[in-house]
Amino acid sequence: MLSDRPTKLVPPVLAKMAAWSLCLILTGVVVFYFVQVIARLSFVVLPVAIALLLTALLYPMTRSLRQAGMRPIYATWLTMIAALAVLAGTGWLVGARATDEFPNLVKQVQATVGDVQEWLVTGPLHLQQTQITQYFNEVVALIEAQRTAITGTVLTAGAVAVEVLASIVLLLFVTFFLLKDGDRIWGWFLKGFGRMSPRVDRAGRAAWSTLSHYVQGSVLVAAVHGVVMGIVLAGMGVPLWAPLAVLIFLASFIPIVGIFFAGTVATLVTLGAKGIVYALIFVGILVVEQQLENHVLQPLIVGRALKFHPLAIILALSVGGILAGIAGAVVAVPVAAVIYRALPELMTDLPALPPPSMVAVAPPVAAGPELPGGPAGSQGPADDGKSGAAGRSGADSE
């Protein structure tokens, strides 16, 4: 007697694995083409990404000015002018110090090279002068062999400079309008999601809160790092201490890798200018200060917005560096943090409404994080009394 139960050609476990495999393949295809589009539009995407970071950094000043009674347009202009003044002042300081101290650095490096050369001859290695000369000639020949490549790089620098200038102009425009009309732009953006706008709104506000805390905390930590190491270099009498302090400040935005690069450059300059003893002292102070930053400053200032394991940070840096070079490594960690915080809000549905008899005693819902361009807790067109539990509760109570 034949069984009436249908025959299963594929075991249930294998069917589930096939379904998950298909989903992963489709997701991989979408991500691949999305990355390709981003790479083709890097001329636009990169300035916009940097503009978002600058907006998260500068918006507290704009908000304070607007709360003091200043019109949005004037508050935005004053914020932009102040930011440009800080950049111009820093550039002037670095340029002036470099112009004054570079000749002295060259003389000190030449003297250090002479001392090292003498130590190689008279020290425990007992190298011959001919051997040292041969090594030096090999280095010079290597540089001469790369002259063509260096010349080609210099020739293409003109076209790169034009692209950089255009990117800076676009960056300034995007930053200005995000500071001035950020909430209105966000409200317009939400209109395209229809019934999904409440989820997108919550995810966007969670992402913006994370980005703001991360950027502001990272700038504060990098500033402390750059000032401390700049004071150490100046106290040692190392030439170019101001440019090196700025380099350490900028490199601090690239976790783990950045400080290694900047520290190496500063150590080499210290070695060439002051000798091996000062270089070792600088390395020791750098290591201690870096440990204090990792175990004290980072957890206290940035830890509330970003709690990533070092392995996750390294993987994010690797992926960002492979996809977009140094710029990708800079934005990789904040992008990963934003995605990590926004996805739960995007995937979670709103809680069910309480019974009508409990509406009056239901606790109020806290306002979302503030977006640039509007007051704290403003919700834009998506939150007009229909997009959230608080709005719907208010509508029912009316």
Image: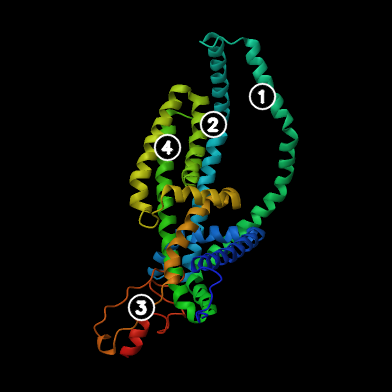
Residue indicated by mark 2: 101
> Which mark is in front, 2 or 1?
1
- Residue at 43% across, 69% down: 205
Q: Amino acid at mark 1?
A: Val
Q: Amino acid at mark 3?
A: Pro
Describe residue 293's horizontal placement relative to residue 110 as left or right. left
User: Can you tell which quarter of the image residue 213 is in?
Assistant: bottom left
Give the x, y percent position of residue 101.
54, 31
Q: Are marks 3 and 1 in contact (CB under 8 Å)?
A: no
Q: Which mark is residue 139?
A: 1
Q: Amino acid at mark 4?
A: Met
Residue indicated by mark 4: 229
Give the x, y percent position of residue 46.
59, 57
Q: Earlier in the sequence, mark 2 or mark 3?
A: 2
Q: Distance from label 4 to label 3 (Cα)?
A: 50 Å
Q: Distance from label 3 to label 1 (Cα)?
A: 69 Å
Question: Is residue 221 at all visible to an observer of this figure?
Answer: yes
Q: Amino acid at mark 2?
A: Glu
Circle 2 residues within 10 Å: few <14, some 14–19, many ≥20: some
The residue positioned farthest toward the bottom in the image shown: 398
The residue positioned farthest toward the front in the image shown: 1
Q: Earlier in the sequence, mark 3 or mark 1?
A: 1
